[in-house]
Amino acid sequence: MKSMRKKQSLILLISLCMSMGQSDFAPYFYDNGAGSSNGNLALFSISEDTSVGTHVYTLNGSDPEGEPVTFGMTFDKGSRDYFSVEPKSGNMTLIQTLDREVQDEIVAFVTITDGRNKVVENVRVFITDANDEKPEFLNLPFVVDVPEDAASGSSIYRVQAIDRDLGSGGSVTYYLQETYLHQLSFRLQSTPSTKFTIDGHSGVLRIRAGESLDYELSRTHFVTVVAKDGGGKYHEKYQVMTSTAIITINVLDTQDSPPLFVGTPYFGYVYEVSVPVSVTLFHI
């Protein structure tokens, strides 16, 4: 009888030890390494021109005991929800338009749970650039006063434009599209002028070598300057973006012309019997 009780106690003790030894481990995300089908968004980046509704990632993980797991994602209070996650598959979909120039990263919290244990990881999603910004001219409008005796080849103005894109899409070069003369009659002519040139990199506008200004012929010049970026991809297509602005060049008069007689030759008549008196014969 005593041996039977000892045997039952031993069985009970072994069962208790076995039950105590059974642990419920928490699920875990895959490391997104080689051979994995995505994971926990580690080092994930997304282009700003990605279309809303696109499947962009799959949260993926497992449970040590083989229990089914579900996934989720949350964002800081006050932040937009940029992605939605299907709980069972972990498929992540973009639900908000991205703009790297406004926000270049998204902070989120991804979760995986087996129903009893829940793991939360803080992640950062980096937004990469697309060539979606035009160059923007600074300090508009462009108006410059230049004396008519300014030397040929001299710099008279500097335009500046910035492009908020990165890389080649953010580099800006300049060129003149068309130049027109505003004549004394203040009637815009259709013949292009070559009196000015612009440095493509610095944006410095100069009087072209061998050219000069003449207030008596042209008091105002209108120059169209183009700012062009270096190009880049946008929605998988290569594009170059440009902006234009008008430079108004007012030519200032200088003392460079002698007086001119108008209506020459002049004629006047005086009678030979005229009485000498102080009178005005005519005006010139």
Image (cartoon, rainbow, N blue to C red):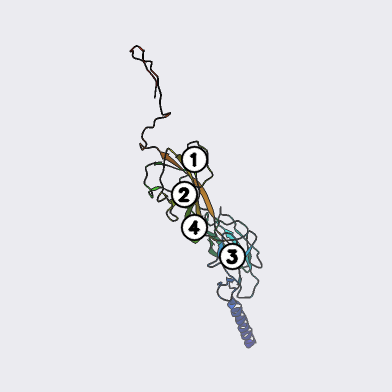
Q: Which residue is mark 3?
A: 111
In the image, farthest residue toward the front? 272
Work out whether residue 219 can be spotted.
yes
Quadrant of the image containing the N terminus: bottom right
Mark with earlier residue (1, 2): 1
Amino acid, disc 3: Thr
Residue under the point 46% across and 48% down: 138
Count the marks. 4
Report which quarter residue 281 is drawn in: top left
Labels 3 and 2: the sequence-earlier one: 3
Instruction: Give residue 182's mark.
Output: 1
How far is disc 4 from disc 3 in space, using C-alphas? 37 Å
Give the spatial CA distance, label 4 vs label 2. Answer: 29 Å
Residue 8 rendering spot, x and y as whole percentages: 64, 83
Q: Circle 2 is placed at which residue position?
A: 194
Query: How far, Cα to Cα, is label 3 from label 2?
Result: 66 Å
| 16 lies above or below 94 | below
Sooner in the amino-acid sequence: mark 3 or mark 1: 3
Mark closest to the chain's N terminus, 1 or 4: 4
Report which residue position mark 4 lands on. 170
Residue drawn at the location 49% of the way across and 61% of the way down: 168
Please say if 172 is above or below 282: below
Task: Please state the horizontal and vertical placement of residue 102, each as a whole percent of the image.
Answer: 52, 54
Give the camera-side residue of 35 and 269.
269
- Of the pair 260 and 232, the residue shown nearer to us: 260
- Asked if residue 57 is positioned above or below residue 186 in the image, the reply reads below
In this rendering, would 160 be left or right of 22?
left
Toward the viewer: 37 or 139?
Answer: 139
